[in-house]
Image: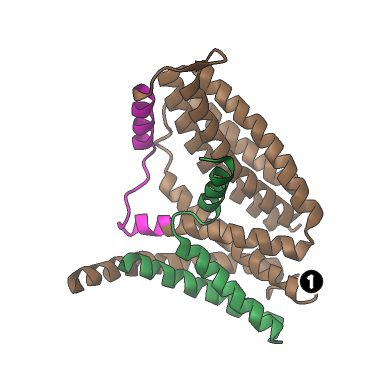
Amino acid sequence: MSIVRAIGRFAYDFVIGDDWKIAAAVVSALLVGALLLVAGVPAVAVVLVTAGLVAAAFTAAMVIDVRR
Amino acid sequence: MAHHAVWGLVLATFVAAFVEFVEALTIVLAMGLTRGWRSALAGTGAALVALAGFTAVVGYALATWLPRSALQLVVGVLLLIFGLQWLRKAILRSAGLKAQHDETQEYREQTQAARAAGEQRRFGLDWFGFVVSFKGVFLEGVEVVFIVITFGLNAGNVPVAAASALVAGLVVAAAGVVASRPLSAVPENTLKYAVGLLLATYGTFWSVEGLGVLHGGRSLEWPGGDLALPVVLAGWLVLSRILVTVLPKVRAREKVGA
């Protein structure tokens, strides 16, 4: 295996880990938060809504994981 | 930095580093006892030197090139993913949906692999023992370095974070010298659950604050500032306990339906 592939694999294992759905859940929730912020939603509301979205997305990822 | 925030930093880095060091120690002990201490310790030493270089480069790059809110967003996202991966495993184990992590079993597997491996010597060292020890210490060490840098930079106190990790390393090393066997008495699953909660809490806090990079570059403020941290921690704890209760029922219903 080339060094580049080995580093890429290490980075994937390190950041994404065993379940890619967790990373997808986190990024999706924060993207929605970013869109709300850019759309002019008050910062305090964005903070609370984004935190709730992270929790909801994590829950969804866990349920999908267990149902498979 | 507020007093409670310092203790939160100390606790989070100590526990997280402790768990990683136990895993590294298990690998080094397995190599030392089966392939020889010279190679195992040489691999450990080489990994520590490589880690020092890695830490200097990454730490300098993060601290120098990124504005505070961007730093919070980047490391917050990584920490959150990292923490939720740990929490996912801890929830599945607590719910009985995944086997408990067992350091004794890990040690047994490592020693069997070490005995089965052939003899190959380079630079006067048993190469298998050297490489496996190096990889184990370096990979677990990178996780510790990552936690120390992110926690330390965000809390504005890298020395305290580094000192906590160092103390954790010394405690584990001392226990390893005394016991010379895997630290299976350490309730690792419980520790991993706690670390997952802490990483998820800080990751949530910082990643959301870091969204401010899109809002004039200034970090967003949580209601109550740092006092929101225990509330976020309580939120993750409650959600995880609910999932531990509910997920087995979801699995059972799925099996009945299949």
Q: Report the magenta stretch's main SS.
A: helix
Q: Is residue A25 above or below residue B129?
A: below
Q: Is residue B123 visible?
A: yes
Judge from the rendering whether residue B66 lies leftward or rightward of residue A63; answer left or right: right
To which quarter of the image does residue B90 belong? bottom left
User: Does residue B97 show up magenta in the picture?
Assistant: yes
The residue indicated by pointer 1 is B218
Q: Position of residue A23 (x, y in %)?
A: 52, 63
Which SS class for mark 1?
A: loop
Q: Position of residue B123 (x, y in %)?
A: 57, 15
How are the residues colored? by chain
Magenta-drawn segment:
B89-115
Q: Is residue B202 visible?
A: no
Which of the pair B186/B30 is nearer the observer? Answer: B30
Single out the residue that lies furthest toward the front.
A2
To which quarter of the image does residue B3 belong? bottom right
Question: What residue is at 64 percent from the left and 66 percent from the top?
Answer: B207
User: Does residue B231 show up magenta in the picture?
Assistant: no
Question: What residue is at 60 percent from the left and 42 percent from the top?
Answer: B142
Judge from the rendering whether residue B9 lies leftward or rightward of residue B28; answer left or right: right
Chain letter, colour brown in render: B
Chain letter, colour green in render: A
